[in-house]
Image (tube, rainbow, N blue to C red):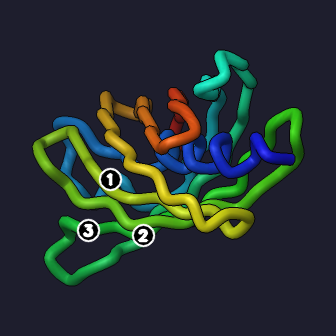
């Protein structure tokens, strides 16, 4: 079960963005996909996630996310807040209900696909998501 917080953070990061050349509002909605988590111990674990994005502010540059992810160690919920940094890039912080450990996430969106990279002190994660 100790892998869940890292996987959760990685998954959350992967779920955290959705807009490329399109407007920021295009991130809204549900995304799902798969990826991997690499722990500092060297262990690699596959993960799958489903993420929902909602408006976080009236300006349309901040979004809140709620995700449910699954890995070999079990399922976990992730939540966070991301901000648009460029036309197709986002950055934010993710949290897991199962851990007090937070993680940073960077997201790049290309059409109906997004890639997310999550980092925390226990490892890194990469997730590719598609719009549902």
User: For mark 3, what is the residue?
Assistant: 62
- Asked if 55 appears above or below 103 in the picture, the reply is below
Where is residue 77 shown, x and y percent of the image? Answer: 70, 61
Mark closer to the chain start, 2 or 1:
1
Q: Residues within 10 Å of mark 3 (few under 14, many from 20)?
A: many
Looking at this view, is 92 or 24 the one in front?
92
Q: Residues within 10 Å of mark 2 (few under 14, many from 20)?
A: many
Examine the rendering and report whether any part of residue 48 can be seen.
Answer: yes
Q: In the current view of this chain or complex, which residue is farthest to the bottom? A: 58
Q: Would residue 3 appear left or right of 52 to someone viewing this image?
A: right
Residue drawn at (35%, 74%) of the image: 55
Residue drawn at (63%, 28%) of the image: 39
- Asked if 77 appears above or below 13 in the picture, the reply is below
Number of callouts in the render?
A: 3
Which disc, if any, is residue 11? none
User: For mark 1, what is the residue?
Assistant: 26
User: For mark 2, what is the residue?
Assistant: 64
**Circle 3 SS class:** strand
Where is residue 3 shown, x and y percent of the image? Answer: 76, 41
Splitting the image into 4 quarters, where does residue 116 fall? top left
Q: Would residue 104 appear left or right of 122 to someone viewing this image?
A: left
Q: Residues within 10 Å of mark 1 (few under 14, many from 20)?
A: some
Q: Would residue 11 appear left or right of 94 to someone viewing this image?
A: right
Looking at this view, is 1 or 86 the one in front?
1
Residue drawn at (74%, 24%) of the image: 45
């Amino acid at each position: 079960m100790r892998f869940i917080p890292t996987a959760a953070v990685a998954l959350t990061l992967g779920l955290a963005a959705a807009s490329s050349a399109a407007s920021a509002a295009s991130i809204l909605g549900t995304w799902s996909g798969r990826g991997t988590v690499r722990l500092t111990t060297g262990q690699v674990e596959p993960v799958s996630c489903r993420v929902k994005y909602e408006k976080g502010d009236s300006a349309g540059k901040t979004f809140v996310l709620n995700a449910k992810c699954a890995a070999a160690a079990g399922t976990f919920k992730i939540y966070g807040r991301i901000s648009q940094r460029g036309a197709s890039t986002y950055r934010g912080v993710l949290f897991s209900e199962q851990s007090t450990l937070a993680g940073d996430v960077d997201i790049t969106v290309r059409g109906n696909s997004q890639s997310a990279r999550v980092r925390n002190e226990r490892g890194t994660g990469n997730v590719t998501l598609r719009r549902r």
